[in-house]
Structure formats: C-alpha cells, structure tokens
Image: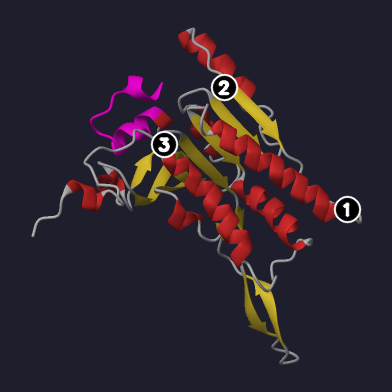
Amino acid sequence: MRKSDNEWSRYVKATTESRLRLIAASYGEAGMLKTSFWLTAPGPIVIQSADKGLEGVVEVYLKTLYEETGQTKDIYVVEYDPTTSGENAQEEAQETRAKFEEDFEHAIHHARTVVWDKETQVYEIFKYAEFGAPSDTPSNYYALDQRYRHLINLSKETDVNFGLIQGMKTPWAPKINKRTGVEGAAPTKSRERRGMREIEELVHINIEHTQVDEDFVLKIGKSRGPGGREIQNQTIPYVDFPAFAQLVFPDSTSEDWR
C-alpha cells in the first residue's frame, strides 16, 4: 500500500540540490598559507581569532586585493584571549566561551564565510571552561564534545562557508630507558593535526596545506560535494578558495565565490 504524502511529513526528503558552500578543515605547519586561503573566500568574512596571528596577513591581503583589482572585501575580526589564570580562571574561560558561541551563531546567519583561526586554540578555551584546568586527561569528555559538535553542526543548517584552521603537534610515544629499563615517553619524529579529535569527521573536506620541494600544495583528504570524489586523496597545486570551490562544485563559476 502506497503511503500518502502526509505519512512522510515527519521526514525531510533528500534532493539532488547541494548547498553552494564549503565546510572544511585546513591544517598544516606555520606559514603554509592556511589563513591566506580562507581570506580569498567570499565576503563578508568573520574571523574568530584565538591566536592573534592575523597581523601582517589581513591588511596585506586587503591592500593587494585593492591594488590588483580595485575591489575591496569586508573582513571582520573578533579576538578571544585563551589565557586564563588565578582563582577565577574557569569563570573567565566560561565567559569567553559564551561570547564565542554567541558571536558564532550571529556570524553564520549574517556572514558569507566564517573562519576559526585557530580551532586548535578554540578547543583549548572550551576545555578550560568545561574542566577548569588545561589537562588533556579529564575523565569525561562527553559534555564538552557534545557542546562543541553541536556548535559546528549549526553551520550545516546555513549557506555559510565555514573554515576551521588547525595547527600541528608532535605526538609522544612510550619508550623504554635502555639504561634503567624504566618505561617512559618521548617525542616521535612525526607530526599530526592538533585540535578536537572529531574535526576530520565533522567537516565535509579536509585539506592539508604543505610544500613539495619549494611549491605550496594542497593534500585533499575526505572530500564531499559534486566534484569531491575527483580530488579526494589527491595532491594538487595550491589554488585560492574560488578555484578550489569550483573543483568541488564543477558547475559553479568564479563569480559564485567572489
């Protein structure tokens, strides 16, 4: 028996239409053009900055854009101080977290692009607000990660481009002291992205910004979108945001991303 349309009203019917926006994580070592990449995204851009690393980048980009094209772009920056100390440290972190969440929920409904620079430090703020200490070993991450996950997923209900920039860290591994036989730990020679551990799963696209010889390149991991499978697990020459977005959405034009 065929169900009537009313009987399906509790569900959302899937369509062939895609939202014309990118939700992506950009990670890599310092100086790999991560922030520069996101500055070329469509404006207005809101950058939620937790590492005060924009000086010498944003103003240079805006000046170059105007000199080369005669155009300008609205870029808004909100700085958050992740430094906490003293007996009121956790309360200060909670106030910072509350402002960050309020600003984010406003930005995703008014800006064309929102960037966390860096998500690495944003997660530290949320951890301190939750646990009251910068420890990596609290017993229960569920409430923290659920709140963080919900915030990120809010962007998926909108048409905003959302970029999460992550730094890198050196992982440690168990090591036996050959002289004493005591088990300890030592830094490895590898590097890995730093931040909330589920970011790779939560975003639609993962981009490692790096170099091959002297050339900047983009190493694409998971990649969703109409053209996503064509670039997934590929290394491509560095391109700006509009050019990259057209690889993900082959039917779009550069004007869709300006």
Give the mark toward the camera: 2 or 1.
Answer: 1
Residue at image mark 3: 238
Give the mark toward the camera: 2 or 3.
Answer: 2
Predominant secondary structure, magenta span: helix
The mark that comes first in sequence, 2 or 1, is 2
> Which residue corresponds to the image point at 74% horizontal and 57% vertical from the top-left?
128
Q: What stretch is highlighted in magenta?
A: 242-258
- Dot 2 lies on which element? helix
Q: Can residue 240 be seen in this view?
A: no
Residue 39, how many percent across, how many down?
52, 28
Image quadrant in which you'd find residue 50: top right
How many other residues sit within 10 Å of disc 1, few (<14), some (14-19) or many (≥20)?
few
Q: Is residue 254 located in the magenta-colored stretch of the structure?
A: yes
> Residue 61: which numbered mark, if any?
2
> Spatial distance from mark 2 to mark 1, Cα to Cα?
39 Å
> Residue 154: which numbered mark, if any?
none
Image quadrant in which you'd find residue 101: top right
Residue nearer the viewer, 97 or 248:
97
Q: Is residue 244 located in the magenta-colored stretch of the structure?
A: yes
Residue 216, how many percent across, how many down?
46, 39
